Amino acid sequence: MSRGFSSTFLSLLLALSLALAVTATPIVQVRDNFVRLPLAKKFNLTGTHTLLARDQARVKHLNALAKARLAGTPLSSDAVIGVPVDNQAVSYIATVGVGNPATQYDLIVDTGSSNTWVGASRTFVQTSTTRQTRDRVSVTYGSGDFSGTEFTDTVSLGNGLTVTGQSIGAATESEGFDGVDGILGIGPVDLTVGTLSPDTTATIPTVRGNPADGKLPFPVTDNLFAQGIITDDLVSVSFEPTNTVEIVNGELTFGGTDSSKFVGAITFAPITRTSPASEFWGINQSIRFGTSTSILSNTAGIVDTGTTLTLISTDALRRYQRATGAVLDNATGLLRITPTQFANLQSLFFTINGVTFEFTANAQAWPRALNTAIGGNTNSVYLVVGSIGTPTGEGLDFINGQTWLERFYTVFDTGNSRIGFANTPFTTANTN
């Protein structure tokens, strides 16, 4: 073997080794930077109100909250005229440890609020890592509320990963949260303004906040980012449709996207500039039924893990009802169709930033195995598309809730003020 050939061969071998290293290493490194929390879907159907009534009460609260924030005034406790306090019906739950040694709490994952708190069921346990601040904390939700004391503490997120200096509300009073311990809020940081007292103008930075701007210890996502545990200031949500009452069927991923959870490319859309949707995780989208029936022209709304159904404006729902032939079911509050109508039900198409996502007929149906759990009968098909309670043009004309998110991988990208969507292996599933 000539010296020239040997040198060339070694160079090629080195280049090949480097190429393989470059190809393989990022996968390992990126996955090591993820913080994953399993999500369990939980039904609490002990309340007396329908899913739609709960969701519409939440919408009224979100609207009132946004208006108060834009006006620079606190949200009064009677600002929302909604349904009476009732248990959260359908929630996605993450188990989070607080303290050292850690006490495990089951928390509702909520992109429409920003405070993280515990104590609704399991009492907050103070340990050597607990530090009390000077503030009281209170938050009103659509059909529930809590109040208590703010602490900072160590929070465990699984896989041995912990964040320190985490702001935690310890509830001394709460209503509407039977069966869970509190909320893991990953909404916009500004929603925490007015929740603390005496620091009424201070923020508790969350997923869309800038940690450098915070006057108080950072909440979960900002702490992960600020402490270098995650490299990107975002959180991704993966849900799967299910027809059982309680199951671990989702994952919350801090700091990146998990390619095993979605198919194809992620489409990103900027946060809308239209108020009040812009105060939350808001986007612009249009909705079409079948090939040519317009349901909702391009308008602003939000993506929200705390809403169960897929809600659209009142006039859009009338168009959807005509297109499907559905009738209103008084027992459930949902639109109802027959099995024969369901067999001919066409897909809804959601166009977001120029890309269209198909919401299949099966996706539009409430899981039939759970019909009786919501007061329905086994022979009917109930639709998960409901009325938001206001006409088009109000600035919050739709909510893509849990039933929609179960079909699409979603990325709440703080650093770039955008939301990403991708199809999943369950987008066209016939689970329901």
Image (cartoon, rainbow, N blue to C red):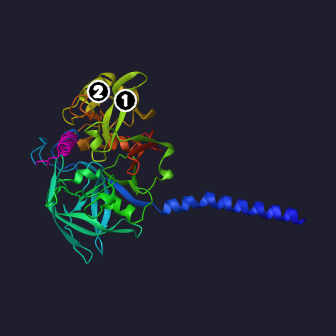
Residue drawn at point x = 36 percent, y = 69 percent: 162
Image quadrant holding the N terminus, namely bottom right
Which residues make up the magenta segment? 54-76
Total numbered badges shown on the rendered structure: 2
Q: Amino acid at mark 1?
A: Ile
In the image, residue 60 lies in the stretch drawn in magenta: yes
Instruction: State whether residue 29 appears in this view.
Output: yes
Name which of mark 2 and mark 1 comes first in the sequence: 1
- Closer to us: 144 or 415: 415
What residue sits right under mark 1 in the picture?
287
Residue that label 2 marks: 316
Amino acid tagged 2: Ala
Q: Residue at x 62, y 59 (%)?
A: 22
Q: Are circles 2 and 1 on residues that touch, CB within 8 Å?
A: yes
The magenta stretch spans residue 251: no
Q: Residues within 10 Å of mark 2 (few under 14, many from 20)?
A: many
Question: Could you tell me which residue is drawn at 15 percent across and 53 percent down?
Answer: 145
x%, y% of residue 59? 22, 40
**Image position, residue 327 (x, y; %):** 25, 26
Placement of 395 over or under 66, stated as above or below:
above
Q: Residue furthest bottom?
A: 128
Closer to the camera in the image, 406 or 141: 141
- Element type at marker 1? strand
Secondary structure beneath disc 2?
helix
